[in-house]
Image: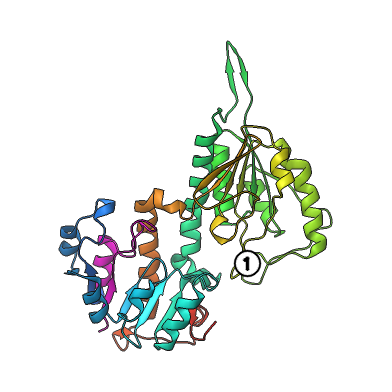
Amino acid sequence: MKSIGSVKEDPVLEKRVSITPETVKKFTSINIPVLIEKNYAVHLGIFDEEYKNNGAVLYNSAKEVFEKAEIILKVNCPKSSEINLIKDFSILIGQFDQLLDKEIINKLIKKKINIFSLNLLPRIARAQSMDVLSSQANLAGYKAVIDSVGEFEKAIPMMMTAAGTVTPAKVLVIGAGVAGLQAIATAKRLGGIVSATDVRVAAKEQVESLGGKFLSVEGEENLETKGGYAKEAGENFKKKQEELLKNSIKKHDIVICTALIPGKKAPKIISEDMVKSMKPGSVIYDLAVAQGGNSAYSEVDKVNVVNGVKVLGAKNILNNLAVTASNLYAKNLFNFVNNLYDNKKKDISINVEDEIISKTLISKEL
């Protein structure tokens, strides 16, 4: 039986973990040994004893885990220093970006390591329990609104007081995928007036079901892939979208940017002039900042103030929700590994006839 291992991520860059005590119990229930590095999740308040009590075997160093485990679970791509430690022909599973992690992925492929990126999961019902993009983006959309409200310095809902009426904040969400829909729902719960826009026609019904107003581009085309993701817009659409946003963005107090195209840099949607057209005190939160950003002036882990407008975005917004994010991520990973489990062989097996396995396996150099 192949064993599963996981080591500490760089705590400055990544606070999430790939294995929780709960998933250790799940792995051991199907006789898969779990190996982890000591002090694996103490930064989250989860101590080694809890892992031991659920059946994990602890090792003093990451090197020992890499030497013994046939399957490695990670959040992010391994560091360059870890590549030589991972055994040839082993299995590596995580949330890897083919654009940002290209160099390291190619080195791993040369070592004949089977790399699975759950970012590539097909949008099918059977894969929903493994969908890390959905579980993590859902939290990111929520947190982006919460952080924006903290920077806004004004009340969000309408308030009737003896001293006068406080008008509700107007929130615009760009991109109505999982993160965008959660941002809409969160802003509505806080009492904001919410609008949203997306390149996918199907998003209109979803936005309106959450109480948001859908801003559509005149004569829009449906820019949705067969897998349900957004695809890159043509020049004509971009011009129409720019005109739509130019007229509407200046009327909003908070803008949440969530637009991403799988495998490509984030589309630049908000121009410098659009930022400057907003009222002083307004806030733009760019969730796409790590992939290049949707907004002008957005920089990783910085708050830039332009004409009184705050533009911000974190490289890893989930570091501030690391316990919840880890619990969901670890369950996604367990469900994926469980799908690799062959009941006849009583071991992990790579069956490329399974759509989930074939679509997530990165087997060629990029």
Name the colour scheme: rainbow
Residue 359, x across and y down, in percent = 52, 79
The reply to whether the magenta stretch includes residue 162 is no
How packed is label 1: few (under 14 Cα within 10 Å), some, or many (20 or more)? some
Q: Residue at x 23, y 67 (%)?
A: 37
Q: Give 272 or 177, whichever is nearer the viewer.
A: 272
Quarter of the rendering containing residue 338:
bottom left
Reading the image, the residue beneath label 1 is: 228
- Vertical arrangement, residue 163 with respect to residue 88, above or below: above
- Vertical arrangement, residue 249 with respect to residue 40, above or below: above
Q: Give 122 or 90, whichever is nearer the viewer.
A: 90
Q: Residue at x 47, y 82 (%)?
A: 106
The stretch of residues the image draws in magenta is 1-28
The reply to whether the magenta stretch includes residue 23 is yes
Residue 169 visible? The answer is yes
Residue 269, x across and y down, in percent = 70, 54
Name the residue type under label 1. Gly
